[in-house]
Image (tube, rainbow, N blue to C red):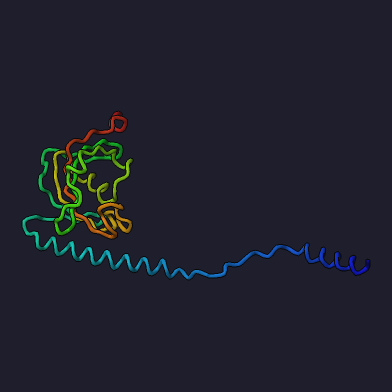
Amino acid sequence: MKKLMLLLFVFAVFACKEAEPRRPVKVNSGSFIKESAERNRRILEAEEKLISEIIKIDSLNEYTATSEGSWYTYLLSNEVSTYTPQTNDLVRFTYALLTLQNDTIYSEEEIGLQTYKVDKQGLFPGLRNSIKLLKEGEKAIFLFPSSLAYGYPGDKNKIGVNVPLKAVITIIHIETDKEESTP
């Protein structure tokens, strides 16, 4: 009986010990993130070089670089209007997506007329930024590195992994946000 009591006492003493936190078996060094960032930098540099070569070859058009990292040239310009779409405006537009080698991925007919509430709906980053640069009635060609297009995942249909794109965008109509324009 004494042995049983001693055993219970020893068990009780060790059972009251504070729980020791579990440690991870493997410590991540962060190398995957560093390697991924470096790989993305190399991809972007290669795509920017390709886009620069396309711009040099296209001597008929003058391209403008955007602050976001895309390039564009006007096919139709509206010299009368000064208004570009602002947040909450409703924009009707058409666009086509092509490879940088001018192979059609999605035609304007496939995509159809789009209605977009500026900055409130999901479009790929390059298209979202480009719409805000054009005025009503304007048509432009935009060149996007893959990071501003569909990026790594693609569109899970016709656009593959890390594919830079050319977009031909036409702004049909801009309906200003009535709440913002009322004083």
Quadrant location, the C terminus: top left
Quadrant location, the N terminus: bottom right
> On screen, 92 above or below 11?
above
Q: Residue at x 33, y 56 (%)?
A: 153
Q: Residue furthest left?
A: 60
The residue closer to the viewer here, 56 or 5, is: 5
Q: Residue furthest right?
A: 1
Residue 111 lies left or right of residue 122; in this view the side is: left
In the rendered image, which quarter is residue 44 located in?
bottom left
In the rendered image, which quarter is residue 117 located in?
top left
Total numbered labels: 0
Q: Residue at x 22, y 63 (%)?
A: 48
Q: Residue at x 9, y 55 (%)?
A: 61
Q: Give x and y (percent) for residue 175.
A: 23, 33
Q: Give x and y (percent) for residue 6.
A: 89, 68
The residue closer to the viewer here, 156 or 148, is: 156
Residue 156 lies left or right of residue 50; in this view the side is: right
Q: Residue at x 30, y 57 (%)?
A: 151
